[in-house]
Image: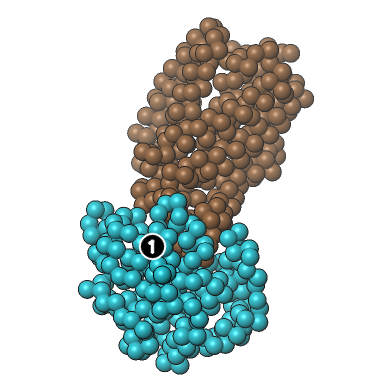
Amino acid sequence: MHSPAIDISGLSVSSGGKPVAGPVSFTVDRGETALLYGASGSGKTTLLRALMGFAEETQGSISFMGSRVEARSVWHIRQGLLSYVPQEVDLGPGTVRDSVMRPFSYRANRGLAWDEARAANLMDGLMLRRDIMEKSARRLSGGEKHRVALAVAVMLGRPVMLLDEITSGLDRRSKLGVLDLISSLVGVTVLAASHDDLFRERAERVIEIA
Amino acid sequence: MREMIDISYSSLALGYLLLIAPLALVLIYRVPVARGLAVSVLRMTLQLLFVGLYLQVVFDMDRWWLTGLWLMAMVAAADLSVLRESGLRAGRLWAPAFLAIFLGTLLPLGYFVRIVLRAPEFMAPQYVIPIGGMIMGNCLRAVIIGAGRFYRSIEESRSHYEYSLACGASLREATAPHMSRAMHEALSPTIATMMTIGLVSLPGMMTGILMAGASPAEAIKYQIAIMISILTGTVLTVVLGIELTRRRAFTPFGVLRQDTLR
């Protein structure tokens, strides 16, 4: 029996000693698409950041594919198991091409080859214009940044994907492009924070956050 | 070598009379710095009197440990200054910053005194204290700019920094662009100084040696050697200052601690 892809137990996040999110406990099975659903301000983004190891004060336990997130394991988990599209995407300086190619220069991703044709296909599927690759990454709209970051996350080929409000601000056609891409990912576990009804309809499981 | 003219105390008192002109002009134009100007002259006099007396004792005793103690005091003062001026919190970072300034200054200083100058003893106070002070002063300025810029740059682009980590970057890879920017800013003043040295004004050390009676040929050799030492010390201190504080400024998860910057 495999351990779940995501196993959260009693996770809560504090800031300056004051609780800001949680406690929550849930599991997500391998290959499942789960939606973290809750009103704005319910702590969805905070919890996803905590799963990435970006929150300074956390209590409880977080495991991915049976590996517990700790100071010593977090780098291995981030570099081998997770991809993440944050709510506020900053793709960094340079063109979109620079941004999408940058992760492939990291030591942890050396085994991954940059595939120009695949990148172009993904951009097409996400309703992004072909010439976007030569545009300044910081001048893209929020929705475009999200979709570019999603394309990068897919190309990194990690088994667990954490997505934060990936469809916010998108028109219906672009939303469907994003959701179709997520549905097409075989064997990838997706945990998405969203309050989008279309996403809710497509999710295999909804985890309500109070 | 010509003898240096000693300024007598009565002549120095005459020198203070020159202050009448700037003070009068400041008062006439109602510039609100008259008090500050007077205090600064007083402080400058008292501080230099104290340093002069102390150095006289250090020079006369000529003990390696006393010279070493003076150097350590300079490093400690520089350390506190770095943490205060760069906006970093002192608590966790004072020890690595101290080590960075200590090593960054001591290595080029030792090379200058022993290899270039071939001084009979490393801790000769008449060389170690003024040259150490010159190297350290420049290292201090550079590390204040460099360390401050490094951490502020990460703080300002926290979203991109975290996105880099999320895409698989190691701590070194995610901080590399910030290191490059910080180094560039920290080294720019030293590089600019070297570009124009001698064209606009004669550097302080060269001026001092010339006034002490040395020939210009002797003076430029000292100046070239000190500039090379300063450049080396500057690069070393900035790199060490960032590398040594980095371990304590980030959580083991790679997140810049919120209490790193004030």
The residue that label 1 is drawn on is A63
Q: Residue furthest front?
A: A1
Image quadrant of residue B33? top left
Q: Residue furthest bottom?
A: A173
Q: Which part of the image, by quadrant, shows the N terminus of chain A?
A: bottom left
Picture layout, residue B198 above or below residue B176: above
Residue at position x 38%, y 62% from top?
Answer: A63
Question: Is disc 1 placed on a helix, strand or loop?
Answer: strand
Report x, y in % for residue B119.
Answer: 68, 16
Q: Which part of the image, by quadrant, shows the C terminus of chain A?
A: bottom left
Q: Amino acid at mark 1?
A: Ser
Chain B rendering hue = brown
Q: In the rendered image, what is the letter of the chain coloured cyan?
A: A
Is residue A94 something one can see in this rendering? no
Residue at position x 61%, y 40% from top?
Answer: B235
Q: Nearer the viewer, residue A184 or B6?
A: A184
Q: Nearer the viewer, residue B96 or B229?
A: B96
Q: Chain of mark 1?
A: A
Image quadrant of residue B189? top right
Left or right of residue B219: residue A76: left
Left or right of residue B27: residue B113: right
Picture layout, residue B52 above or below residue B249: above
